[in-house]
Image: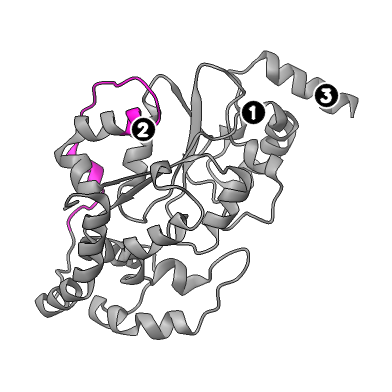
Amino acid sequence: MKQKVKIRNFLLNHPHLNPYKFGRHSITRTIPYVMFRLPTSKKRMSPSFLLLGGQKCGTTTLYDQISRNKQVLPATMKEIHYFDNNYNKSFNWYRAHYPLKTSEKITGEATAFYLFHPLVAKRVKKIFPDIKLIIIVRNPIKRAFSQYQHNLRLKRENLTFDNAIKMEETRLKNEPILENKLLFSHWFHSYKKMGCYIEQIKNWLKYFKREQLFITSLELLNMESQNTMNDIFTFLQLDNQNFSISKEAENIGGYKEKMNKNTEIELSEYFESYNKELFSFVGKKLW
């Protein structure tokens, strides 16, 4: 115990040291994490905001832009996955991912699966009832195809896009939603369901007030970068800064396969009512 206190005090006196980042992967991070960050977890900041997703909607880009504000200190990694896959771990485990406490700055994290996971909103409410929530969405047809291409590259998908769309309901129906994490197909094969953003937002509104949510889109982030970031900083009660967001922010790249026109029309019809309700809720078109 004395050794643990010595380590903690040393780190508190040397905040520039972050041995947690010595390794890129979870296995190589485990030892420095347990030795150096966990003992100081109670001295660390709690998040002022969560960027909830959705997946393949530009969360990485947006979190990077928010973190460039001089009043924001980022977490040790973008996606901590505490409220979905790691909820069985202690709160100190979660807090250990954040910077040491300071009264002049704020911190937060971005886990793109939080928006979609049906249990996360209730879990966040229990710990952080007054937290600010940021949601970034995207044309759901483009999002679905982007997710599919990403799955192909990582060998998580062996169907054509057309067949993956047709098989989605069957794949999800055969998987239960577990208490601690969702199974494979809910995570990777929810091409249509993840794009029904308004349904996911309604779940969050069961636990949080409308004024705690800021909703934007990848399209607005690219077309109206400065105004969008200024609005976000105002929402977070931070000073505005000048930004220039590259088109590379979309993280799309060129696809060898093009979407079948009939599938695109089918998806457009499927998402039409969801998009219309979302635009009405937000008060403007998002793409």
Q: Is residue 255 visible?
A: yes
Q: Is residue 170 above or below residue 16?
A: below
Q: Return the residue at label 1.
A: 44
The answer to whether residue 272 is left or right of residue 9 is left
Q: Nearer the viewer, residue 203 or 217?
A: 203
Name which of mark 1 and mark 2 comes first in the sequence: 1
Residue 271 placed where, x, y %?
22, 70
How far apart marks 1 and 2 lie (CA) works out to: 23 Å
Question: In the drawing, what numbered circle is on residue 235?
Answer: 2
Q: Amino acid at mark 3?
A: Val
Q: Amino acid at mark 2?
A: Phe
Name which of mark 2 and mark 3 comes first in the sequence: 3
Q: Nearer the viewer, residue 263 or 177?
A: 177
Mark 3 secondary-structure assignment? helix
Question: Disc 1 vs disc 2: Cβ atoms closer than 8 Å?
Answer: no
Mark 2 secondary-structure assignment? helix
**Residue 247 counted in the magenta span:** yes
Quarter of the image holding residue 97? top right
Quarter of the image holding residue 12? top right
Which residue shows up at 37% across the image and 65% down it?
199
State the predominant SS element of the stretch in magenta.
loop
Q: Return the residue at label 3.
A: 5
Q: Is residue 34 above or below residue 82?
A: above
The answer to whether residue 242 is left or right of residue 262 is right
Name which of mark 1 and mark 3 comes first in the sequence: 3
The magenta stretch is 232-254
Residue 164 placed where, x, y %?
31, 79
* Residue situated furthest left in the rendering: 261
